[in-house]
Image: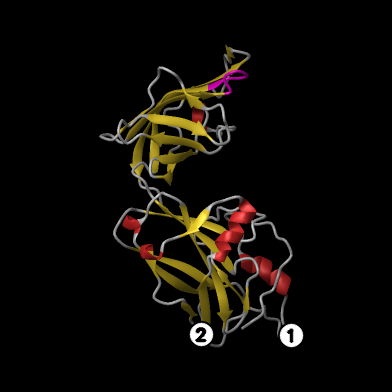
Amino acid sequence: MKKIINYISVLLLPFMFTSCLKDDAIIGPDAAGNVENIIEFKNFVAPSSGTSSKYPLYIQAFDMVPTTDFAIPVQIAGVYNPKADIKVTLELDNSILTAYNAQNGSKYQPLQTANYTVSTYEVTIPKGQKIGNLNIKFFPEKFDFKESYALGLKIKSVSEGTISGNFGAIVLGVVPKNLYDGVYTVEKGLVQRYTGGALNIGDALNGSLAGNPKVTLKSIDGNTVEITNMKWAGGASGIAGIDNLRATINPATNEVTMFALGAPTLRNIAGKVNKYDPATKTFTLNFDWAQTTNKREILDLQIKFDSPRP
């Protein structure tokens, strides 16, 4: 087994950080001018953890179907081509979840073993190639929303190369998609900003929301979604100050309660409609925030389901 190397701190860029660049620069060339191979988990979605987290977190949402096959890629992050297949032994290690929770204040629990199966934790990266896959079969219809579930995975040993110190162990968050999850078009709506109780006349950010970029509704639990990509009028810039904007739907009445983790004052506007129409898959929303300082409000926002979320 090759020794795991601890690397110096490196800034992780969510959509760009390719560990081969970091590891190549740190390891350096060998006597023949080649770069030692780094074996690591490859990014299969944009990581969701902060840059200071010891373990990268990846969130994968699944449609509620009986079974689905999912591949986690393991890659060679070096320029030297090995002369033979590389055998990689992976391991399920849910103590990684405990460490991740302690560092990040999260509450991930191990996914129940009845909800997935792995035929082998042995991965082969064929000679002349860069990637091999760990194949997991999930059973999404058995998922529930009682807890936040995840798997802790690590590279235990490799037949050649060095296990990455940055991406040699990961947290895979497993999320079922609820009924409201998806990409939605902005059909209509009005956004308004106030200063000192007076409407900001001539404010370029005020006005119609119709035709703004699509918004994404991401499952949080069985009846709650997080709404992202909300824009001011004209769609040119994102609405700040409402981080983790969320909607909870009462499945018995289809009434919606609006709130935001990043804006404790955000709430439904009393007397106005906040409801989901299951027949048309359309939300009608009215909410405001910062009511006692410089109020912001969104009126008669209608968003309609367009497509499943990737």
Residue span colored magenta: 290-296
Name the residue: 59% across, 53% down: 49
Give how far across and how far down residue 37 sits, in percent: 62, 78
Give how far across and how far down residue 189 sits, in percent: 42, 25
Q: Main secondary structure of the magenta part?
A: loop
State left or right for residue 193 relative to residue 307: right
Give how far across and how far down residue 266 sits, in percent: 53, 27
User: Residue beneath label 2, please?
Assistant: 85
**Element under label 1?**
loop
The label shown at residue 136 is none
What sort of colour scheme is used for the picture?
secondary structure
Residue 50 showing in the rendered view: no
Quarter of the rendering containing residue 211? top left
Callout 1 amino acid: Ala
**Element under label 2?**
loop
Quarter of the rendering containing residue 284? top left
